[in-house]
Amino acid sequence: MAEAYITGIGQSQVGQKLTRHPLLLTTDAIREALADSGLSLADIDGISTYPGKASGYLGFSPVGCEDLIDALHLKVRWYNGGMETSAQLGAVATAAAAVKAGLARHVICFRTVYEAAAMARPQDYPMSRSARVEASSQWTAPFNATSAVTWVAQYAMRHVKKYGMTREQLAQISLTDRANALLNPRALVREPLSMEQYLAARMIAEPMCLFDCDRFSDASTVLIVSAGDALGDVKCTPIRIAASAYQSGGRHSWDQAEVMASYPTGAELWKHTDYKPKDVNTVQLYDGFAFLAITWLEGLGFCGIGEGGKFIEGGHRIALDGELPLNTFGGQIGAGRLHGFGFAHESVVQLRGQGGARQIKGDPKVAVAASGGGPLASVLLLARD
């Protein structure tokens, strides 16, 4: 009874420079999730999102809980949204805790991004600017390190220098993502990628090149989290949130921490379940930059620390027909920057056997979905009982 399940999934159109309003993209995804679950708006009594409405840059997060409450005339008993939480899927883990505690029965969890459209129409979606460098940016902006790719590159280069990771090994994340994206009709990227193209691409922040970076996109992804004693309301195959973990790696900094938060968070996950890494059928791991997926593989114990490059060498192990299929929908590098929620969405698709051309073989019952990088990390272990 005191369990939490994902009972509905939905996703809007995924594109770049879309003209459909982000609130309408959000309601599109909600409508699909409700139809998937068999629930109605009257059944919804909770909302959870990350990071809430970002008034300073609406492209990053243009829709908040209160927008949905007003637009859909929802009567909710509990809602949650904020930047200071443990990465994107922390909103789902928090919703699971809420339904287990009896604070809600059916919670809409959503993440809406509108970055490509905002960049194309800055007059409609302006970014607030300050003449003063302060807070965490005081440690990065003076060094022209204003993009997260430069922050992640420090950790990636450590793997190159300390563990011998090669560009050919790192490339396997991007090559796998792009190959899987071609089988996903909603994916943003529609062209294949070869090793030759990857190695010839311009460097963005060594050792990561252009193809190691995700692309700004416009989309909304929705998950409905339901209480175990409310499954009688739903008409789909529920997927249980068997365990979750979300924590900081220590100092909340991109450039002063010894390791990314994915390492302690990955280890923490297995303390809350009887499942082991060997039981997992597929992993959907955050790849805003390709190297982040490697840190999750190591942090979750699928290989040793420093062994991520060798673990994915050649790409066979993480391919769609490999022993540990990775990012079967194309990840953020191939499917678009859905900012974390796409990994949980795809996990449900795979565990239900609804992946179509990209469906993994056998009868998958356990999946891991992870989000975040640097000092942010949250991970879900999902199971089809």
Image (tube, rainbow, N blue to C red):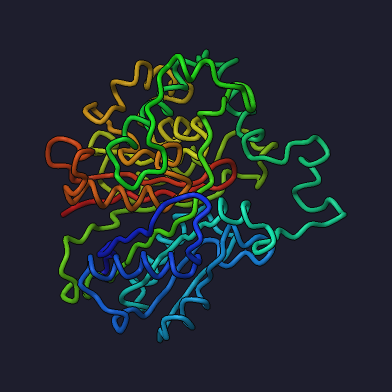
Please count the marks in the image: 0
Does the rendering let one see residue 165?
A: no
* Residue 297 occupies quadrant: top left
Name the outermost residue toward the left.
362
Percent x, y of residue 21: 50, 67
Identity of the residue drawn at 66% across and 33% down: 150
Q: Along the line of sight, which residue is nearer the eye, 132 or 239?
A: 132
Percent x, y of residue 184: 29, 42
Name the outermost residue toward the right.
131
Is 77 on the left-hand or right-hand side of 182? right
Percent x, y of residue 384: 18, 53
Percent x, y of residue 52: 55, 66
In the rendered image of this protein, does residue 353 appear above or below residue 191?
A: below
Q: Along the line of sight, which residue is nearer the eye, 128 or 85?
A: 128
Where the C terminus falls, by quadrant?
A: bottom left
Identity of the residue drawn at 36% across and 28% down: 176
Q: Along the line of sight, which residue is nearer the eye, 361 or 95?
A: 361
In the rendered image of this protein, does residue 276 appear above or below residue 310?
A: below
Q: Along the line of sight, which residue is nearer the eye, 62 or 295?
A: 62
In the rendered image of this protein, does residue 371 appear above or below residue 36?
A: above
Does the rendering let one see residue 156?
A: yes
Identity of the residue drawn at 32% across and 41% down: 329
Is 278 on the left-hand or right-hand side of 249? left
Where the N terminus falls, by quadrant?
A: bottom left
Is 241 on the left-hand or right-hand side of 56? left
* Residue 2 occupies quadrant: bottom left
